[in-house]
Amino acid sequence: MHVAACIRVSIVGGGSYPGLHCHRLISAVEELQLTDEEEVNGKSWASQRSVFYVSTKRSASVRMSSKPFKIFVGYDPREEDAYQVCRHSILKRSSIPVEIIPIKQADLREKGFYWRERGQLESTEFSFSRFLTPFLANYEGWAMFVDCDFLYLADIKELRDLIDDKYAVMCVQHDYAPKESTKMDGAVQTVYPRKNWSSMVLYNCAHPKNRVLNPDTVNTQTGAFLHRFQWLEDHEIGSVPFVWNFLEGHNKVDDKDPTTSPKAIHYTRGGPWFEAWKNCEFAQLWLDEKEDYDLQAKKVTN
């Protein structure tokens, strides 16, 4: 195996946030195809927190720390397929070290980090727990939160390279007012200022203002305070091009303008893993990615 084209995979078992237990080298040419069965604590690799170290000539130009870029993905048991496909789409295209960590409410409750009762308007288990991202990253460096209903079509390095340390957070600043009254599998569709800003956020975890995002705040503050970023001044919120949170059913591609092509599709109304949304826009792209994920997962267990 050529040393300059390899991927080091660290697979974590025993929950979502413990230390590393297993390391494996695989060829980058194989595109994440493990050659033999791999299980950690009785669970397949695909369900674990994973760290991928990509060592290639391309990664030599990384301008930031060589530590893995932490990506926290909102997890809901109803959307297991969505989570796995989102995770797969990031890992498959990434040219930088990334660490993908599911935010699982059950794990957070067990650790005493989350005790909030679920409200009627919370459409997912991570509606509020997403704001623990800086806390879970130990208030160090930059980390990203993203909903599980995203499909990445571009290298996450492109997004990470947009980071500007003068901001406390960076996100796509949508002006979004959905027309539907329900979404996903019948959840109530709500409308509020800055809707969908919090669905994909780059957090400057070390920024002093983000220290307020601790378990006490996340468990007691209002949805308005958190989802509207009311702990920050407007100038502390940086903007990211909309193609990194391209809202299915809302944002449009201009065939004459390549800058409008999505780099990350957000199936915010509901994706093809829900029966009601199996024919949504870009459904086939997600289904193709799911097929590729299933193929890779099958190779692990065979």
Image (cartoon, rainbow, N blue to C red):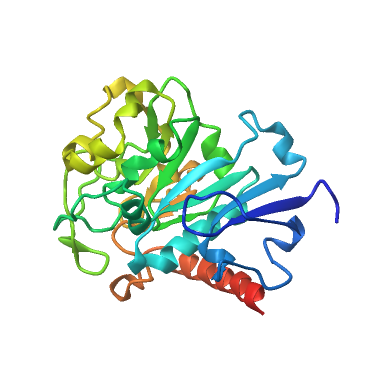
Between 48 and 179, the one lying in front of the other is: 48
Between 38 and 128, the one lying in front of the other is: 38
Residue 104 seen by the camera: yes
Residue at (25, 40) in percent of width and height: 218
> Is residue 212 shown above or below 41?
above
Q: Is residue 98 left or right of residue 239?
A: right
Q: Residue furthest bottom?
A: 302
Q: Is residue 134 left or right of residue 66?
A: left
Number of numbered discs overlaid on the protein picture: 0
Residue 293 % position (x, y): 56, 68
Q: Is residue 85 left or right of residue 33?
A: left
Residue 103 % position (x, y): 39, 52
Residue 11 % position (x, y): 60, 57
Residue at (28, 48) in percent of width and height: 114
> Is residue 17 shown above or below 64?
below
Residue at (34, 59) in percent of width and height: 106
Residue 262 seen by the camera: no
Quadrant hosting residue 33: bottom right
The quarter in which the C terminus is drawn is bottom right
Residue at (23, 58) in percent of width and height: 123
Between 147 and 152, the one lying in front of the other is: 147
Between 237 and 265, the one lying in front of the other is: 237
Residue 115 % position (x, y): 24, 50
The quarter in which the N terminus is drawn is bottom right
